[in-house]
């Protein structure tokens, strides 16, 4: 079999053409996700894997530096032909070379593969262990947008349909936005959620830079819900290939009796259909029905809209230095503290 070679891919069109045609295509491996991380000051490596001069796989690597050490992460990737011998091993060889160059103590990978025994065995056979912390959403809910609006409504929980209708009757106003000012509004409403749920929020810089990176390619949308002039909810959506992703959200602690978030979600589903998307990803949910899980409340909300649960292979770490075990212990403690 012909040799596999690896080299960096700098051309956006070449990268995007491959990712958009990959069966595991997702925004976390898009050129813009790398660009967004670069805007935050992280080094990014876009690896391409070639056989007989043809691009056959890609891997987006982001170098992260924290107080506990330096590591490489590969979000929702690599995108390689898993069934063809040699590609996974060549990916690992290339990643180890970059890790040595960047003095990384480990590599964290959360592939866009289903959570199946054979995939666990594959990673274990290459020296990976289950990561103590997640890397982006690992359990999600996905709606099939090829259904009609009537079918989508019928598949919802009765209380969810009622809340949508109630918000409509109350006169909740929905507005589409592409304004930087509304990213600040999202950040402010997210701060109100933090007081209710107790989690570590994303910074304004993080949200704003992400928004500004995806906006020029029309891959982003903010949707607002207001009642009698008061902004009650705002959500941040990413559109990539055939999927719409409900990525971030914030809601006010005022007027909790007004079900604005339900109508906002329904408006987003209809917007995604209008844009020709076939999948609506409600993003992260709790992996079980544990009422103490930090995401228990939002999981109950999301499940009301129906959809199919999708479990991805959890993040796995490849330890490269003994200092990794300091990270392992620290993150295990942090996971328990955060009720994850």
Image (cartoon, rainbow, N blue to C red):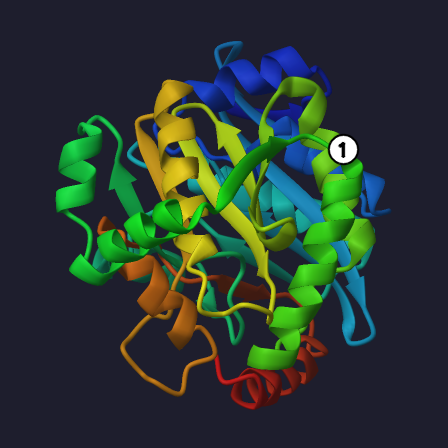
- Count up the numbered dots: 1
Judged left or right of residue 239, residue 178 is: right
Seen at 30% across and 27% down, the residue is 278
Q: Position of residue 212 (x, y in %)?
A: 76, 33
Q: Nearer the viewer, residue 255 or 21?
A: 255
Residue 55 in the image, given as x and y percentages of width and height:
51, 16
Instruction: Reply above or below: 238 against 206.
Output: above
Query: Residue drawn 38% across and 76% down?
Result: 296
The residue closer to the viewer here, 282 or 86, is 282
Neighbours of disc 1 within 10 Å: few (<14), some (14-19), many (20+): some
Query: How far across and down, in percent of the image, does residue 280 sit?
Result: 35, 38
Lateral position of residue 249 relative to residue 102, left or right: left
For the question of whether residue 191 can be seen, the reply is yes
Which quarter of the rendered picture does the N terminus lie within?
Answer: top left
Q: Is residue 339 left or right of residue 270?
A: right
Locate residue 307, reporting x and y percent: 23, 48
Regarding residue 198, the answer to whether it shows in the image is: no
Which residue is found at the position 19% from the left and 58% from the top?
A: 157
Closest to the observer: 145 or 4?
Answer: 145
Residue at 44%, 69% (x, y): give it: 257
Residue farthest right in this picture: 41
Badge 1 marks a residue whose secondary structure is: helix
Label 1 sits on residue? 212
Q: Is residue 134 above or below residue 126?
A: below
């Amino acid at each position: 079999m012909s040799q596999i070679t690896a080299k960096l891919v700098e051309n956006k069109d070449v990268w995007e053409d491959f990712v958009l045609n990959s069966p595991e295509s997702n925004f976390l491996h898009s050129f813009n996700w790398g660009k967004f991380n670069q805007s935050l000051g992280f080094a990014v490596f876009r690896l391409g894997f070639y056989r007989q001069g043809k691009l056959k796989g890609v891997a987006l690597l982001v170098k992260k530096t924290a107080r506990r050490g330096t590591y490489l992460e590969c979000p929702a990737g690599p995108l390689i032909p898993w069934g063809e011998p040699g590609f996974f091993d060549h990916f690992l060889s290339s990643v180890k070379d970059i890790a040595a160059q960047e003095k990384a103590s480990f590599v964290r990978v959360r592939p866009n593969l289903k959570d199946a025994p054979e995939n666990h065995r594959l990673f274990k056979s290459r020296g990976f262990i289950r990561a103590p912390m997640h890397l982006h959403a690992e359990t999600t809910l996905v709606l099939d947008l090829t259904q009609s609006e009537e079918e989508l409504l019928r598949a919802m929980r009765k209380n969810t349909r009622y809340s949508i209708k109630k918000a409509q009757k109350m006169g909740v106003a929905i507005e589409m936005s592409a304004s930087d000012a509304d990213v600040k509004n999202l950040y402010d409403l997210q701060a109100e959620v933090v007081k209710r749920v107790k989690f570590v929020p994303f910074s304004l810089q993080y949200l704003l830079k992400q928004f500004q990176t995806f906006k020029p390619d029309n891959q982003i949308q903010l949707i607002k819900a207001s009642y009698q002039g008061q902004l009650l909810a705002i959500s941040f959506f990413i559109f990539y290939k055939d999927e719409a992703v409900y990525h971030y959200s914030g809601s006010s602690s005022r007027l909790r009796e007004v079900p604005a978030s339900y109508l906002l979600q329904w408006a987003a589903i209809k917007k995604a259909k209008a844009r020709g998307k076939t999948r609506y990803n409600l993003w992260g949910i709790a992996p079980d029905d544990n009422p103490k899980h930090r995401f228990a409340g939002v999981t109950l909300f999301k499940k009301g809209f129906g959809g199919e649960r999708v479990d991805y292979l959890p993040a796995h770490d490849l330890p490269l230095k003994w200092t990794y075990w300091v990270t392992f212990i620290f993150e295990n403690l942090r996971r328990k503290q955060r009720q994850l």
